[in-house]
Image (tube, rainbow, N blue to C red):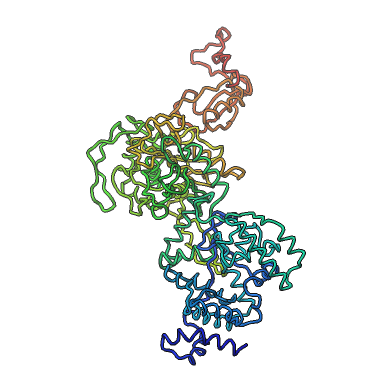
Amino acid sequence: MGSLAGVLVALIVLPVACTVGVGARDGANWLQEEPADLDLGPLAQRSKILAADGSAIATFYYQNRVEVKLDQVAPVARQAVLAIEDSRFYQHGALDAQGTLRALLKNLNSGQVTQGGSGITQQYVKNLLLYQADSKEEQQRALALTPARKLYELKHAVAIEKRFSKDEIFQRYLNIAYFGDGAYGIEAAARRYFSTSAAKLTLGQAATLAGIIRNPQAYNPRLHPGAARERRDVVLNRMVELGWADPEQARRAAAEPIKLKITETPNGCTVSKAPFFCDYVQREILTNPVFGKSAAERERLLKRGGLIIRTTLDPQTQQAAQRAVDRHVPPKNSAGKAAAEVLIEPGTGHIKGMAVDRELGPDSERGKTWINFAADASHGSSIGMQAGSTFKAFTLAAALEEGMPFGTRLMAPVRYVPTGYRNCKGQPVGDTKPLRNSADGEGGRSFSLVTGTHHSVNTFFLALQKKVGLCDTVKMAEKLGMRQANGKPLEQFPSFTLGFNAVSPLRMAAAYAAFAARGKYCKPIAITSITHTSGRKLKVPEPECKQVMKKGTADAVNHVLAGVLTKGTARGMGIGRPAAGKTGTVDNYSAAWFAGYTPELAAAVWVGDPRGGYKYPMTSLCMDGRCYGAVFGATIPAPIWRDTMIGALAGRPASSFQRPPAHFFSRGSGEDLVELPDVRGLKLPDAMERLRRAGFRVVVGAAVDSEYPAGTVAETSPGPGSRVEPGITVTLHPSSGEPREREPRPDDDDDDEDDLPPDLPPPVPEHRRMPPD
């Protein structure tokens, strides 16, 4: 047999050797030398992106392949492949002399290579060279039916037979072979056609898959069931001939039609349940040098590396966000508006949800877009959107960081000429054009830090920014991670506090998450770990968290912004647990925002028009039969936030914000003064309930003598009718039921004492004795 193989090699080598000037005697030595370009690196395997709970978000692959070991392939499947492709594989070496002689004679008769006669090792080499081809030219060379090609293939086969055992070669072959329909390797093929694993293939299924290998297009059972069945039966008959299959079992298998159970294997983010988060993760890998020096290297890693990418996404939060944006701004809405929302966990920077009211796809198709409106340009091509009054929170934080009490009051004129500002370079910046208050705020009087924020008064914040310093306000925003969505630094002009900079919901959510985390800002992260197919852990970006303001400052911000949901521009948007937030209505109603948070979760919502907010403002918006008129931050964005937060936090314990330090109350609470109700004469529980409903804290002091009945309120401190700040503590003094002793007057006379009327308090009106409504 060795002599015959030598003759065959000589016959194959001779024409090529003579062409290149190499003698036939040198051919055998050349054949035995290991090729310098022999590359047996790992095969491309599909990568998976997983949510925080381990559920699949998306799959990426260059070739849909799941590598398995030989003992993970059913014996009947191994026998089927060997039977039809190379039944003597375990008996011959790199060259099957019988098969090669048969092919050689036919090729010599025809004058060209028409039959390969290749064994499994040579087929493996051909598949390997095809897999490694990076261009169409290299692919064509790998498939060329020429003597030179066969010689090159045989040389590699000899080297592989020296390096690996037969079982190892067969395993590699089963994992690299193409089975049509995008399935590479027998495991992917089993899943694709029969929704099973290679280990559980039946005789009929194994014969079907083995028959496909020779011509994956012609014998594809999904496309050509008739041809596939005939080919399957050829495999079954061959297995019977070799004694590898029971004739009766083979007959029964041949009598059955091919019963397919197709399983789709999604590729990429377009079919993901979290498409824009998936796209964000994909872009993070493709653009971050930590995952490869070049873009091509990073793409190969993602699509060929068999990566397991674990992320921060919380399915419950993602589902709640997607439902909310789709409900309030339907993907194919008649007005052409769009919405985006990002949710971040305070204290970690983990992105828990990212939703856009669109499908990921061509913008030319209605309801689809490639632009991730939730992220920066680097992670989704968005140039960002003006943020409106959500930026006022940064001015508030800068003022509180400098120690301004809540009761600090500034005059907010109807119009404000922004002069006298300087940027962080010390350069004067200003404008002689007066700025005015938007429709979600008012001016013409003084406001405190608290009431100015609750009412979102533009001219108040322009004055506050001037008092704090434009640069200090900008630096506070920068410390909270804010920058333009195009990656450039924030622009510095007097209207900075009014939110003219174009930013992303992602950065806004991260900034507000820092308030919830008591001043600790964390850079948003989506990836927690990446495991290579080899089991090696890859380096991922480290969490970056930093305390950027005093904890007490953040507590004070939370205290003020909590009032926005109860008495400010977003009143009525509470979620049944401690929460805070800020509305944002962009100039000319070109967009609307809401950024809000609890101690557990922060979110930012944007609603606008992708075609251009100034060209398509939301002034008289009607969308799918529902009309809103002018759209403010509380009109659509806040309800999206509310619905999302209720769904995302359902079943999760609530915690409270910390009370701000006492020095912030040095000038009072900052609330507008109200009149203290008169509760004298009411029973103590009824009086306490009435005051608490009015927003006051209540304590009970010592009993006092009074003409009021015992157990009723005789006195309050402060006194009834006093103008006080809401939320102050009111002390109730119950009546002892004993009348006070009247002090004698200087002109009192013992003789006429009995003639004087008693000194009684005025009668208590009947309505005061009844419990409050």
Left or right, residue 329 beside residue 83:
left
Q: Residue 101, image x and y in percent?
A: 58, 81
Q: Residue 142, image x and y in percent?
A: 48, 72
The quadrant in which residue 69 appears is: bottom right
**Quadrant location of the C terminus?**
top right
Please state which of residues 336 and 642 is positioned toward the viewer in this rendering: 336
Instruction: State how many labels appear.
Output: 0
Please state which of residues 456 and 469 is positioned toward the viewer in this rendering: 456
Q: Residue at x 57, y 32 (%)?
A: 699
**Quadrant location of the N terminus?**
bottom right
The quadrant in which residue 686 appears is: top right
Please state which of residues 736 and 43 is positioned toward the viewer in this rendering: 43
Is residue 662 visible in the rendered structure shown here?
Answer: no
| 741 shown above or below 490 | above
Q: Furthest-front residue in view?
A: 109
Please state which of residues 310 and 434 is positioned toward the viewer in this rendering: 310
Q: Residue 607, image x and y in percent?
A: 42, 40
| 511 shown above or below 101 | above
The quadrant in which residue 229 appears is: bottom right
Q: Residue at x 59, y 79 (%)?
A: 102
Q: Furthest-bottom residue in view?
A: 25
Left or right, residue 617 beside residue 348:
left
| 610 shown above or below 96 | above
